[in-house]
Amino acid sequence: GTDASSPARRRIMGSPESVPSGDPTTLARAEQRARQHRQAGQWHEAERAYRAVLQIKPDHVPVLGSLGDMLKDLARHEEACHLYQRLLQLRPDCAEAYSNLGVGQKNLGRYEAAEASYRRALQIKPALAE
């Protein structure tokens, strides 16, 4: 089945207690746990907690951005770019996501795409140039 106790779900998500339910309070706690793991440098645990939230709510914009930022910091640029692109599908006016996407694209050697992302970020929020 798809419940939290299924073997397939445990393999994907880790222990059953790491799988949040869909209610906002539980999702907020899972997001907070992910941030705490990230701040403690516990990258694997943070990633698992962020992805657990996204399993329940794939359009959770703050978690898409936070996980993207963490993966960018870990030089996992392809994965980070994918998350920023998902975020931008939901929030096409997010200048920071375009800027971060540009960083990832630049680090992957996709210079024209990076330039386009940076330009779009500056169109939305000129103050980013400062």
Image (cartoon, rainbow, N blue to C red):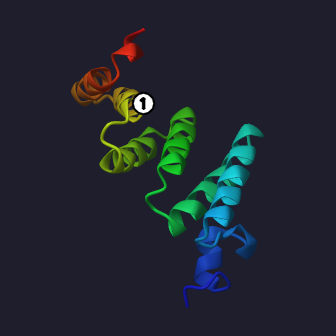
Residue 116, quarter of the rendered image: top left
The three-letter amino acid code for the residue at tag 1 is Glu
Image location (x, y in percent) of residue 13: 62, 69
Residue drawn at x 58%, y 81% is 8
Instruction: Pick the residue in front: 110 or 66.
Output: 66
Numbered disc 1: secondary structure: helix
Label tally: 1
- In the displayed image of the protein, which residue is found farthest to the front? 24
Instruction: Pick the residue in front: 127 or 41.
Output: 127
Name the residue beneath numbered marker 1. 96
Residue drawn at x 57%, y 37% is 74
Quadrant (top left/top right/bottom left/bottom right) for the N terminus: bottom right
30 over 12 or under it: above or below = above
Residue drawn at x 71%, y 67% is 18
Image location (x, y in percent) of residue 60: 49, 55
Image location (x, y in percent) of residue 15: 73, 72
Q: Is residue 87 left or right of residue 25?
A: left
